[in-house]
Amino acid sequence: MISVENAQSIIQEHILKTEEEMVTLSNAGGRILATDIFANFPMLSFDNSAMDGFAVRSIDTIGAKESSPVTLKVAGISSAGNPTDLTLNQGECAQCMTGAEIPKGADAIVIVENSGGFTDLGSVQIFKEAKHGDHIRKLGEEIPTGTKLISKGTQIAPGEVGTLATFGYGELSVAKKPMIAIFGTGDELINPGETLKQGQIYNSNLPVLAELGIRAGGEVVMQEVIKDDKDSLNLFLSKAMCECDIVISSGGISMGKYDYVRNVFRDLGVMEEFWKVAQKPGKPLFFGTTPSTLIFGLPGNPVSSYICFVEYIIPIIQEILGLKKPRKLTAVLTEDFPSDKKKQRFLFGKAWINTDGKLVCAPTSKTGSHMLTSSLDADCIIEAQPSEKNVKAGETITIQPLNWRSIK
Ligand code: AMP
Ligand code: MG
């Protein structure tokens, strides 16, 4: 039996390389950028109008007031997408809409509200003196060419999608999602929706593990409940090991008569890196490798498999994707936490900011590794090092936030 820390560092040694793939911008949301993104041109890429109005030579508007307007000849129109070739001469202006290129010779925009008497082409009265640069958005004012816009490893959210679109990226390179196979084993398992017979239970682990795998950024491509039968396990596993980067089993890895998973892994040439970790729940955790696949044998008890996935597999998926590992936090316990003498103890819990602004937490009262409802409403996993004594209320403890919930 090895320590949690040891188990995590052994897994770390076998991390898979990030692979890249091209996706179109419309499919890029939520993916992780595999390269830095640079501005290939300046933003703005040309001087344009910030308002609807008239592009003028500011010098021509000197002294303009509502009571004594300046009259200018409207010599052309520049609208967004339809620039004009016109160069303004003295006494001339051009109608110029928001986003339209500023005609040559103009150095300010007079907004429609400060003008009058304009019908179509012809002339317009200017009611207010314009200053050089008024309402003109300048070339390069937001971002100069060559600026790094978004760093590799960033998860693409609405702001990133918009920036990529603004700079014309129709497709981009993202980290390829690791392909995951998940299987559960147990003669007692049937799938939700079917009718329970005596002695049967619903398979709840695979839906949980698949949900976790997807949320972590993986792609679950194979998922199956298999009987406690060596041949069936062998068949599924040989295919999964060929096609997937990560193979995850639940159940059948402990000391029971029909716990065949470890033997089947071995028969298929999986190199056992460790089996059994000093933790509660999740002691029978198995980790093995082939040259191209990481293989995790999670214990069948629902809380054990859920917690092992969060503690061991989510960090690995995130690292393969080029993301930072999930961050652990320290919180103050509001009630005692039941430690174990020899094993690291994990329990689902709730964390919140109390009225003093401190991060506090409390473990679930359902401590059995078969009690999956202890995960309902949980927003963290609380963890304590092996110890003779329980961690007391008021002491600090480590928590792993469940990042799909926000701590309030
Ligand atoms: P095992 O690790 O196969 O000894 O299973 C430990 C416990 O977890 C047993 O009570 C199993 O019935 C239960 N179990 C195993 N697999 C699942 C599953 N996919 N969904 C729900 N419970 C399971
Ligand atoms: Mg079993």
Image (cartoon, rainbow, N blue to C red):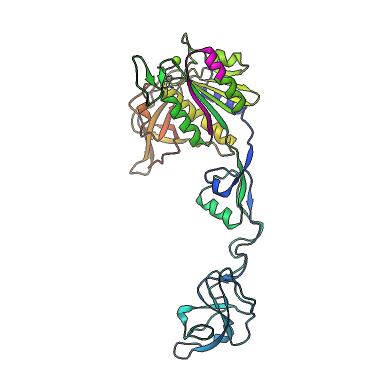
Q: Name the residue nearer the viewer: 34 or 222.
A: 222
392 sits to left or right of 153: left
Residue 89 % position (x, y): 63, 85
Residue 30 % position (x, y): 52, 44
User: Magenta stretch: residue 224 in it?
Assistant: yes
Residue 152 lies, with reference to residue 289, above or below; the image says: below
Residue at position x 45%, y 87% in the image? 66
Residue 243 % position (x, y): 60, 27
Residue 281 lies, with reference to residue 59, above or below; the image says: above
Residue at position x 37%, y 19% in the image? 201
83 sits to left or right of 369: right
Q: Quadrant of ligand 1?
A: top left
Give the quadrant of the C terminus. top left
User: Magenta stretch: residue 312 in it?
Assistant: no
* Residue at the extreme front of the image, as rendered: 194
* Quarter holding residue 317: top right
* Residue at the extreme bottom of the image, as rendered: 68
Q: Identify the magenta region.
A: 218-235
Residue 156 lies, with reference to residue 384, above or below; the image says: below
Q: Name the residue nearer the viewer: 211 or 397.
A: 211
Q: Is residue 3 visible to us here?
A: yes
* Residue at the extreme top of the image, as rendered: 257
Residue at position x 56%, y 14% in the image? 264
Q: Is residue 384 visible to us here?
A: no
Residue 360 lies, with reference to residue 299, above or below; the image says: below
Total numbered badges shown on the rendered structure: 0
Residue 148 % position (x, y): 63, 53
